[in-house]
Amino acid sequence: MPILDNKDLVHSAYLEFTRQSWAELRDNVPLTLSEQDLAKLKGINEDISLQEVVDIYLPLSRLLNLYVEARQKRSTVQGQFLGVTDFHVPYIIGIAGSVAVGKSTTARILQALLSCWSDHPKVALVTTDGFLHSNQELEQRGLMTKKGFPASYDIRSLVKFVSDIKSGQPKVTAPVYSHLQYDIIPDEYQVVEQPDILILEGLNVLQSGMDYPDQLHRVFVSDFVDFSLFVHAEQKQLKDWYIQRFLKFRSGAFTDPKAYFHHYSNLSESEATKTASRIWDEINGVNLVENISPTRERANLILTKGEGHQVEKIWLRK
Ligand SMILES: Nc1ncnc2c1ncn2[C@@H]1O[C@H](COP(=O)(O)OP(=O)(O)O)[C@@H](O)[C@H]1O
Ligand SMILES: CC(C)(COP(=O)(O)O)[C@@H](O)C(=O)NCCC(=O)O
């Protein structure tokens, strides 16, 4: 699918950067990573290339830092107007994109980098998976093969969650989803306590009311998101990354007898590849085309990845 095929929109709304021109932006301010930072990043995912972090994610963290600073100044002004000192409004960054494009990896890299800046050390990360309906609920609604589609989320609870965070509530909880159990974990919650920044990651963060005709509401997640990022790659590439991740799970997480897909660990490599390919074609690929890709041009920034998860193009909304 061509990216940004609406030429008018491209020329009027976005600035386009090649990998090289983007990487050069980090030269304006010297940015370095300590040994400790590097270890933290390798801990997130050992496949992450450090060159990628330096060329793409450091300039991005610098840009985000400037945006957050500007927002914090605005909050101070708002506080002055209201006669309130220490007026605290968390900054929300949304990360959207297909299943397996690398949303959660991108989110964790940004969390690690942004928490290094002294003005906003408290960076929370929440994934919207936690707002999926439980398997029991999905089964009742006949939606077990639609996981990740708009109808599979309790979107009202998700909107309430971001609204509570933005309104500065001292403790906000989010339900937790387990990829291992392939379900919501009953009675387990993630507590978010007034972060400086919240990174909200999920394939649905840029979706709007049109995507949820059966759950009519007027306020969307994106109304609370200060900066949104869409991670894009060609579908053929995405399917390949999905299959590779599935094969990794098959020889790793799925070997746990508690895993929902434990039976997949007994599959041969070619059977597992066929199974993952079918899940992609029937569920995740369809969701990408119908519900995720159409939200791409709502993002403030689009990262286009090629082979090996290398970011090749960056589009920044003016
Ligand atoms: N920057 C990256 N470099 C190398 N591998 C990556 C990178 N980002 C993601 N991956 C790999 O791609 C797969 C999908 O990434 P993940 O973050 O789980 O995607 P998502 O959260 O979008 O489903 C995983 O196997 C992950 O290890
Ligand atoms: C739970 C998910 C919708 C979320 O996607 P992710 O966080 O991996 O981008 C997805 O991983 C999923 O389970 N999709 C349904 C089909 C499948 O891949 O098993």
Image (cartoon, rainbow, N blue to C red):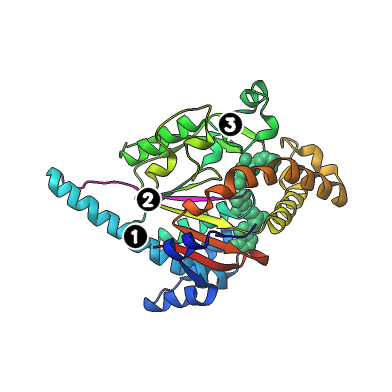
Kindly indicate whether the residue at mark 1 contacts the one at mark 2 (C-beta within 8 angstroms). yes
Q: Position of residue 152 (x, y in %)?
A: 59, 32
Q: Quadrant of residue 51?
A: bottom right
Residue 151 numbered tag: 3
The residue pinned by badge 2 equals 226
Picture quarter with the C terminus: bottom left
Circle 2 Cα neighbour tier, 10 Å, few/some/many (<14 / 14–19 / ≥20): some
Q: Which residues are magenta?
A: 85-98
Q: Position of residue 225 (x, y in %)?
A: 40, 47
Q: Which residue occupies 50% across, 42% down?
A: 207
Label 2, secondary structure: give it: loop
Label 1, secondary structure: give it: helix
The residue pinned by badge 1 equals 67
Circle 3 Cα neighbour tier, 10 Å, few/some/many (<14 / 14–19 / ≥20): some
Looking at the rendered structure, the kind of residue marked 3 is Ala
Q: Quadrant of residue 256?
A: top right
Q: Which residue occupies 73% across, 56% down?
A: 240
Q: Is residue 5 left or right of residue 256?
A: left
User: Which of label 1 and label 3 is nearer to you?
Assistant: 3
Decide which of tag 2 and tag 1 comes sooner along the chain. Answer: 1
Looking at the rendered structure, the kind of residue marked 2 is Asp
- Give yes or no for residue 90 being in the magenta stretch: yes
Spatial CA span between label 2 and label 1: 9 Å
Looking at the rendered structure, the kind of residue marked 1 is Tyr
Q: Position of residue 280 (x, y in %)?
A: 73, 46
Spatial CA span between label 1 and label 3: 33 Å
Circle 1 Cα neighbour tier, 10 Å, few/some/many (<14 / 14–19 / ≥20): some
Decide which of tag 1 and tag 3 comes sooner along the chain. Answer: 1
Q: Is residue 132 left or right of residue 164?
A: right
Picture quarter with the N terminus: bottom right
